Image (tube, rainbow, N blue to C red):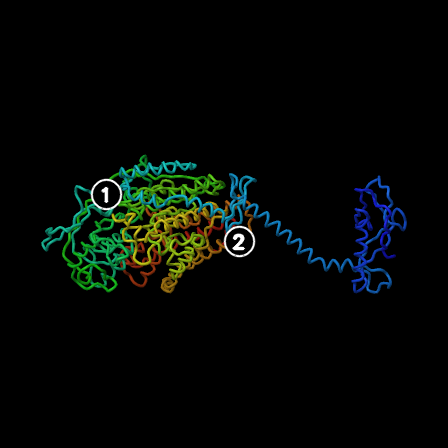
Amino acid sequence: MPALRPPARADKGPTQGSHKRFTIGGGISLQDSGGGTSMERLWGLLQGAKRLSPRPSQTTYKHVGGPQQGCPEEEEEEEEEAATPPGRFCPMELRGPEPLGSQAGQPHLELWAAAGRRAAPYLVLTALLIFTGAFLLGYVAFRGSCQACGNGVLVVSEDVNYELGPNSHQRTLYWSDLRAMFLRHLGEGSLEKAIRHTSLRDRVAGSAGMAALARDIHAALSRQKLDHVWTDTHYVGLQYPDRAHPNTLHWVDAAGRLGEQLPLEDPDVYCPYSATGNATGQLLYAHYGRPEDLQRLRARGVEPAGRLLLVRLGAISFAQKVASAQDFGAGGVLIYPDPADFPQGPHKPGLSGNRAVYGHVHLGTGDPYTPGFPSFNQTQFPPVQSSGLPSIPAQPISADVASLLMRKLAGPVAPQEWQGQLSGSPYRLGPGPGLHLGVNNRRASTAISNIFGCIEGRSEPDHYVVIGAQRDAWGPGAARSAVGTAILLELVRTFASMVSNGFQPRRSLLFISWDGGDFGSVGSTEWLEGYLSLLHLKAVVYVSLDNAVLGDDKFHGKTSPLLISLIENILKQVESPNHSGQTLYEQVAFSNHSWDEVIQPLPMDSSAYSFTAFAGVPAVEFSFVEDGPPYPFLHTKDDTYENLHKVLGGRLPAVAQAVAQFAGLLLIRLSHDHLLPLDFGRYGDVVLRHIGSLNEFSGDLKARGLTLQWLYSARGDYIRAAEKLRKEIYSSDESDERLTRTYNVRIMRVEYYFLSQYVSPADSPFRHIFLGQGDHTLDALLNHVRLLRASSSLGAATSGVAPGLGFQESQFRRQLALLTWTLQGAANALSGDVWSIDNNF
């Protein structure tokens, strides 16, 4: 094959604007334009590469046949070409490498391979740089335009890469942009002014002042142009003090005659739902009135039965104190605030010695005169009462009155940990002189109103993310309900502003102002009872704003296990109100040794309790609290804006703003994430902790021919179902809306799966096997097992077994069976369709 020669230079180039293409073997074409200089450059490139080549190329070219044998094939692009071509190429065919032993003297062109190898990295690098620069330029230009997004907005969260909007013209809004939008609109409101204004209004449930406030709240929601605003009215039985016949406390002499009357100081302070009537008996000191405290009294030879108990505020609720006293046969209860339990000192305002603390004593929630049923005016139900209503009277008293009583007590000295800071001699257990307690509270049918505002969701409008705050208060209620009401209204205004600027939540947001909260979450419970069959299918989560600001040192949450991971994530997004440069998560991690100190189960006195324990809806209530003794003015007439502001060292507006940020970001994630951010696997750990407590008694059970094997098996099936669902979600197509909705439905109903299906909501309204009340719960099963070793009234009182009967094998078998099948049912439901269930039960 002859070597390629450089083309001869033409006397005259092609006509202006013309160009030629030379084809090599029909596979490689070379274009020449501008007078043939490209061909000369090609020849120079080839010769230079040949000189640099260390050995002959293994790639060769040979002649191929063409229209003119032995001559190059030439194609004319333009028929009007008049000039002769500057040179002619013979057709070439590109062949693969010859064997190493090929004939010497044949021309080789290693140029192509050597030059390509050397140039390739630079070409790749140049292409990457061009692509990266173009991408960054486009991204910056796009981000700048995002501030003026159209009516539709797509959201990308940290956990869910993106959401598909209903319209193709929608732009992407990243989580940081959405968070910035929320914070920008939230900053425009004035929480401090709203808290102060609300705390100055009279708003006892059923009062004229409450009716006026309800109208104002309804008007405020209506001004925000929400999708829906409405009011639900319930007619409930509330208990008030009888001003014509106030409650009394007298000494009783040895003959049983009434003696000197002790001052109760404020006739307006009482215990709603206390039994009415009189109680007479000797006085005992019973610490906090917990079951273990009363059991300890008995162990010390001091019998509570037939006595009046003096108990301290704290540790457990008013209702639990009275219920425990009743279980131990006491005749009545006096509840006082001990100075040892509240802050003292020049820099911390304390509760006055003549202040008593208000609190209801119904061991439950809602209207106790229609248990399990909604209190709508048009409904008629049998005249039944809640089993949580006490049969003994109870009355709050001040520390000053308690000091008078304590000085009269005889008997053994109280344990050191029971000692308090009332003036006088060391605390004694009693008994002391006789007392007569008279309670004359009156019951009244009262209309209460819950006010609702709704922003409809775009993709799942029938799934509700609910946030609420108590509106009523017995006194000024700055911390009790004014803060929560102000934050609720600010969140309504903020989200309404975001919607007007293009924000569209995936799920519906439901904002609710509750009435009757100080009587035991009456308004919220009646709403749940009225719409229970609907809400367990549609309510995703409930967020409570009650008691949200009681300090600023620590963050405490009370919640379902499903929400713990999400709470941790949101805490990392909110700046600490009193530690500059720190997030709330960092503040929590610094001030607490264990996460269990920060997040705890929902107690019965939480306003969110009914949502989870009764309706099976995961719920959360959170608070900023003081590091040390609690806020002293809750449920008193001293719960004013000024006192709350002073306790927080002037930081009330900043702390309230942090609460609003936390709640708002929580709502955004819950209402807008493509996949619900609920950690359904957490309940496997909860079951494991309970089973761990039961393992201690496995030997005792085995001796009776009993086993916990089926409970272990159900727990294993739940864990496997949770892991299977995780894998399904991980491998699924996120853009498949039907599949995503199916997953969300399974996730949002996990809490409902733990409501026992084997007890009646009317008889046992709190059916949740972990949080509920009754012998269907895991706690009741554990307490029953404990009776195997010590047949005590303490264990019997909390196990569903009558005191004195001890361990009951038939009842234990029933408890174990119902618990096991409730847990197994949760595992089966989480697995999805019946053909997807895989267990070895």
451 with respect to 804 (left or right) = right
Q: Judge the density around disc 2: few (<14), some (14-19), many (≥20) Cα neighbours within 10 Å.
A: few
Viewer can see residue 735: yes
Q: Amino acid at mark 2?
A: Lys
Q: Amino acid at mark 1?
A: Tyr
> Quick one: 752 or 123, which is closer to the camera?
123
76 with respect to 158 (left or right) = right
Element under label 2?
A: helix
Residue 331 horizontal/vertical position (percent): 20, 52
Residue 261 horizontal/vertical position (percent): 13, 50
Q: Which residue is mark 1?
A: 240
> Quick one: 786 or 100, which is closer to the camera?
100
Residue 518 horizontal/vertical position (percent): 29, 45
Q: What residue sits 78% from the left and 62% below the top?
A: 52
Of the 4 image quadrants, the one containing the N terminus is bottom right
Q: Are marks 1 and 2 in contact (CB under 8 Å)?
A: no
- Of the image marks 1 and 2, the number of the one nearer the N terminus: 1
Figure quadrant of residue 579: bottom left
> Quick one: 767 or 210, which is closer to the camera?
210
Q: Which of the labelled discs sits on residue 727, or is there none? A: 2
Give the tally of numbered discs: 2
Q: Residue furthest top?
A: 378
- Picture layout, residue 808 above or below residue 162: below
Q: Residue furthest right?
A: 69
Viewer can see residue 90: no
Residue 570 horizontal/vertical position (percent): 44, 52
Element under label 1?
A: strand
Residue at mark 1 to residue at mark 2: CA–CA distance: 56 Å
